[in-house]
Image (tube, coloured by chain):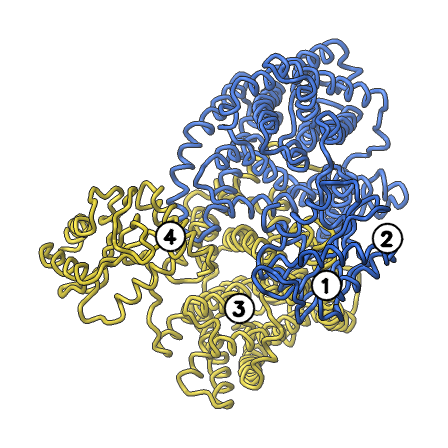
Chain colours: A yellow, B blue
Amino acid sequence: MEALSHHDLTVFFTSVALLLMSARICGELAQRAGQPAVLGELLAGILLGPTGLGSVLPELTRSLFPTEGPVAVALDGVTTLAIVLFLLVAGMEVDLSVIWRQGRTALSVGVAGIVLPFVLGLAAGMGAPVAFGMSPESDRITFAVFLAAALSISALPVIAKTLLDLNLYRSELGMIVIAAAVLNDLFGWIVFATVLGMMGPGDAPAMDVGTTIGLTLGFTLLVLTLGRWAIHRSLPWIQAHSTWPGGVIGLALTLALFGAAFTQWIGIHGIFGAFLVGVAVGDSAHLRERTRTIISQFISFIFAPLFFASIGVTVDFAEHFDLALSAAVLALACTGKVIGCALGARWSGMPRREAWAVGFGMNARGAMEIILGLLALRYGLINERMFVALVVMAIGTSMISGPTMRKLLRLEKPFRLNEVLDPKAFVRTLAAVDRFAAIRELAGPLCASQGLDRAKVESAALAREAMMATGIGHGLAVPHARIEDLSRSAVAVGISVDGIDFDAPDSQPAHLIFLILTPINDDGAQVKVLAEIARRFSDGPTAGDAVAVRSFTEFLAILKTRATELGA
Amino acid sequence: MEALSHHDLTVFFTSVALLLMSARICGELAQRAGQPAVLGELLAGILLGPTGLGSVLPELTRSLFPTEGPVAVALDGVTTLAIVLFLLVAGMEVDLSVIWRQGRTALSVGVAGIVLPFVLGLAAGMGAPVAFGMSPESDRITFAVFLAAALSISALPVIAKTLLDLNLYRSELGMIVIAAAVLNDLFGWIVFATVLGMMGPGDAPAMDVGTTIGLTLGFTLLVLTLGRWAIHRSLPWIQAHSTWPGGVIGLALTLALFGAAFTQWIGIHGIFGAFLVGVAVGDSAHLRERTRTIISQFISFIFAPLFFASIGVTVDFAEHFDLALSAAVLALACTGKVIGCALGARWSGMPRREAWAVGFGMNARGAMEIILGLLALRYGLINERMFVALVVMAIGTSMISGPTMRKLLRLEKPFRLNEVLDPKAFVRTLAAVDRFAAIRELAGPLCASQGLDRAKVESAALAREAMMATGIGHGLAVPHARIEDLSRSAVAVGISVDGIDFDAPDSQPAHLIFLILTPINDDGAQVKVLAEIARRFSDGPTAGDAVAVRSFTEFLAILKTRATELGA
């Protein structure tokens, strides 16, 4: 049996570990900077690959991420599996019914958002194929159709994430964007699959272009109708007769892999089959939320970062970066998509600002464009210059999407409790035994840290407390005051193991005391902080957890995991 | 870049899909027959491999599961990654503190359960190495130590599962078995790592045996002390400052892979490092239950089946099966482990039957033995005959473990609600509008299906109902009767969308009505069924879900997923 040798395995484990670690870290940093995770994941690979580490220590990079030999093949196998599974998850996020529910507007945005970029792409591809990085051996028409598909596709996962971050996901505007993006994606992927079909199946058994395209369309139709119905019907049976959720997870992955094998066999790439299976599986109302979560979290947190980081190590981004081409592709992509979608939205009567916001929302290309570009590169349709330009476009469009929408819709930044908590004003063990002493004890470090006049703050908070006690039950107390010299809200946290009487409606002593200072002229600030605290700690156990923490970091950890469990 | 070709990818996706599908199906069937899942998973591979499909269609098997070329390497990469991650999960299940908590008995069982099999293994290995399948090029002492380690190791995941199935996991006896098994495993793996070290690092950079063994022990110590402490301290920080649970999942997998790379580099296999990292990560009280669940479910349901099935396709079990050797290894393994552990338990004062039960509980070798055997085979320490014998022993010991313990401890089979529900007595829409009519409506199909006298059953159930109504609130009603000619309990289920008044304490109408018939002389039966129904459907939403179901299968699905969510 041809197996990986002892040395191969050492390299293999090290490379996968390095890719995963750096992708996760850079992905987190990107998200923290308000950017899509895929930007960081890709950057991680670029740092590890020929562009970064490789330019300093070429030997090390070559031995860690070899381009030939068994380790290269094993890494290719793992990352290919990763991307197939990622497309399964991307497909699972597609909700077909949303298209019908959003009706005319979604249809109009979706169609206009496809037609304009598609026409622009066709024109650019036919007019200046070489300038747009067509590889010498490709056919001009195939290339033009590819460019058209590349410009019309959107990135559902990135779009959904942006809308979630802006608190727009459940809004009407959000649903229209999602519905139009679903339409775009289905159309874009089918066109792209057709492009791959047009190129012929490469080394696969001879199959003519017509057959490939026919099989692609037939398979799409079959999976989305009969396949979807069969999966929906069989899920309850599988849940009833197999270990749960193992049975359903196994079914989803098996079907995705068979779908991948079939689409690979007919001459287009496996990711297409996995995506379609994802759409069919995700559509069933019998799929339990917990099964969906396990599949999507494991794949999004492990497989997707691994795949995007691996792109960075296989392509030399510095060498192939072409500013003019990247700028041209980015401009073309934004023009087509933003104007197309905005026009579509205006036609169905949407106000101007909202219409532009829809355009920018739909403009994000994210992960999908990168995958599509990589395949085109591998299939020899485009050169490295164009691939890098597509990646730049994918990331550029994703980065401007959120901030532009926020500006157009005049949205405030969502409030986050941990941003107003002052780490220097965390009192692990309050010495105080009554509420007024507790307020004084918290005011000390908070005023020192924020540079406030302690006497003023204390008197304001104590006066408010004296007026009416601030115990809100469940072991929580929220003494507060509005302060003149304050530019932004600041909160101190104190823990009392024995509890302090804050005269709560449930008569329970307070274990967790938040001293909340808000700017005097910011009317909404106090209400926001109070509401957030009440929401996060509205049930007993968490206050209990909080009492068990030993440091500010442990306190933040509980705050964070708590919020995620509640789905915030 | 050396990548998998179009055709390679088609084969690769198909093989992984086939392995996963058959492993999951056979694993489920094995569990349903009361056997460990690994038995079915292995069998799935055997059916797909040279022993099964290959003996009929050798060409097809060779092209689906090639032993050479890029697809073979890619499959090897994926399955190796799978086994490393599986060992991470196995390690996470090890709870070091349990050893101290169980004190003297656990120590005595653990030590005796290692010493006897170890001595037997050493003697057999030194005395008759060739008969026990030593490969010609190995060294006799190394082989003897290997055999000793192979006989002393246990399979924590299988043991834990058996104890869970027998409802013994939280009992004192269960905890003693677990603690002793943890001891056994730690010791066994360290010895086995030493054996691999004794063989020298193969093609890895020259490192002498002493260095390898020294590094192995040093690394073990380091991970279990400093590493464990560092992970425990960093988890809250990671939870506070990264996406949850993605940050922690990423950390666990990254560390496991780095650990694997290190142990691979020093000349032993990567699984050892992953196992140790698992122990260190799993030990932290900061690891949230949900993170643990996502990691372990995805890996146990996807990676582990893939790995065990892949073993079946790489080895020809029919060709290398040696009855005498398999019997000898099985006998040796059982003798050493069962007697050793039972003696240890007796010495610390355990009653005879319980001591034997502990012995049989510890005897299960399951997945661990197979992994250990596979490595020994790959490293050229044993031949295929001995590998097959070890697999037979692993499965044999796991299969007898549960039933023997049940017999020795005189345990009843755990009660499962779905086993008493009669599929033919499921009434999707009750026509009845009052409780007596509902009972009659359910009695009809139930009596027909069970061959009972309808008049008798109806009058018994109606009399009981007339005495005192059986609505128990939350939309549930449980009319019941004891019946003379019944050999085992039988339950009919009826759904009423509008609800029927069963005079429940919360005055809510009943939507879900269970007609429960139990044998007249089985006192416990009725209480068991009633308690189980109340437990499963004790909160409103589920009764609501149940009303929405359209078939008996969908009803079972809700029952099943509900129970798992509640952790039953």
Amino acid bearing label 3:
Ala
Which of the chains bears the disc numbered 2? Answer: B
Mark 1 and mark 2 in contact? Answer it, CB < 8 Å: no
- Considering the numbered disc 3 on the image, is that residue within a helix, a strand or a loop? loop
Mark 3 and mark 4 in contact? Answer it, CB < 8 Å: no
Mark-to-mark CA distance, 3 and 2? 57 Å
Q: Which residue is mark 3?
A: A155
Mark 3 and mark 2 in contact? Answer it, CB < 8 Å: no
Q: Residues within 10 Å of mark 3 (few under 14, many from 20)?
A: many
Instruction: Find residue B190 and report its horizontal and vertical position in percent.
Output: 57, 22
Same subunit: marks 4 and 2: no
N-term mark: 3 or 4: 3
- For discs 1 and 3, the disc positioned in front in the rendered view: 1
Quarter of the image holding residue B523? top right
Same subunit: marks 1 and 4: yes
- For discs 4 and 2, the disc positioned in front in the rendered view: 2
